[in-house]
Image (tube, coloured by chain):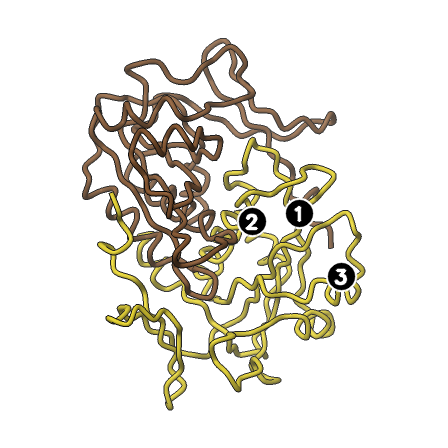
Chain colours: A yellow, B brown
Amino acid sequence: MLRDLILKNRSYRRFYQEVDIKRDNLRELVDLARLSPSARNAQPLKYILSCEPKRNSLIFPHLAWAQYLTGWGGPCEGERPSGYIIILGDTKISGSFGCDHGIAAQSIMLGATEKGLGGCIIASIDRDGLRKALGIPERYEILLVLALGKPKETVVIETVGASGDTKYWRDSDGVHHVPKRQLDDIIVG
Amino acid sequence: MLRDLILKNRSYRRFYQEVDIKRDNLRELVDLARLSPSARNAQPLKYILSCEPKRNSLIFPHLAWAQYLTGWGGPCEGERPSGYIIILGDTKISGSFGCDHGIAAQSIMLGATEKGLGGCIIASIDRDGLRKALGIPERYEILLVLALGKPKETVVIETVGASGDTKYWRDSDGVHHVPKRQLDDIIVG
């Protein structure tokens, strides 16, 4: 059931870093994105894969992690992602990417969940730094970085309270709490 | 398997219009979007549902259908969508929606596929016209319209040829052909 997969697909930010991801697994995930809808079927998205410790370490410093968790600078060594899929927009194909990268990212994250992996869609990126670190040609716009690994944290969904506050938070046991709006609050007609 | 669902989730533009969609089914689909990732967990997306012929007929004229199929103005009466989910961005919650609507749309379309439905993510919308027709408050930005129904056409995936042309086309039997780029052409690193 898709609903079970969607429920299991939480945003994870701590991982068993020692658990490898194979490049072939990342390719299978990109293939899911390849087969997903694209505006005007233009398919302007391109992908960079990383699953080796050295390359992973070039990517990690350019990502911003969990801005609501003040005082937490992101996962420590040993709990970092085992792999990444960087989603690029090829400006030689299209000048705008609409929400193609959102569609692709959701296909990939659901596919990762099905493989027992998890991760986080990151849009808060030091793009210049990442471009330099990996030598990404100017032709490609850096849209998203998907961080992937075997999740090492518990994430629970809660209901947004009367305050309307949607900030996620982490309790003293390290459990990550995510308030979601109720269905009747998001259907407006 | 997610891959089977993704393969089955083609963009359909002709439907058995007489096959009803229940409002509860549309609510279940929005619930999948509700449980999907949102940047900073802000959850700025809101939804309008339509599954009654009269309301559907208010939405249909404001949608652009299959721009590559020149000479085809969209599905004729009898082959039009049985329902719609309109994805809005609530500007009181956020000034930008990133690719949240892409993520939400993919969850909804995969959920629809699982229910034996199909449809099309439409971004080419006469937004002013649709806003007037449904009385959508200015507070909401109209992001996408998801057209849904029981598919009445065959869609086949093909490989983009040497010309690089990604335009979809319809053959004399009405079969819809969609050229997709190959995996090795979209992985660039």
Q: Nearer the viewer, residue A111 or B35?
A: B35
| Disc 3 element | helix
Q: Nearer the viewer, residue A58 or A178?
A: A178
| Disc 1 element | strand
* Residue B110 against residue B21 in the figure, above or below: below
Q: Residue at image x 30%, y 48%? A: B30
* Residue A81 against residue B99 in the figure, above or below: below
Q: Amino acid at mark 1?
A: Gly
Q: Residue at image x 36%, y 71%? A: A178
Which of pointers 3 and 2 lies earlier in the amino acid sequence?
A: 2
| Disc 2 element | helix
Do callouts 2 and 1 point to residues on the same chain? yes
Q: Chain of mark 2?
A: A
Taking the image as shown, residue B117 lies to the left or right of residue A117, namely: left
Image location of residue B144, percent across then percent down: 43, 39
Q: Amino acid at mark 3?
A: Arg
Query: What is the distance, in whole Å, between disc 1 and disc 3 at their CAs?
Result: 13 Å
Query: What is the distance, in whole Å, between disc 3 and disc 2 at their CAs?
Result: 18 Å
Image location of residue B56, percent across then percent down: 27, 27
Image location of residue A61, percent across then percent down: 68, 75
Q: Nearer the viewer, residue A94 or A83?
A: A94
Q: Which mark is residue A89?
A: 1
Q: Residue at image x 73%, y 72%? A: A58
Image location of residue B29, percent across then percent down: 29, 46
Residue matched to label 3? A131
Q: How many marks?
A: 3
Residue matched to label 2? A101
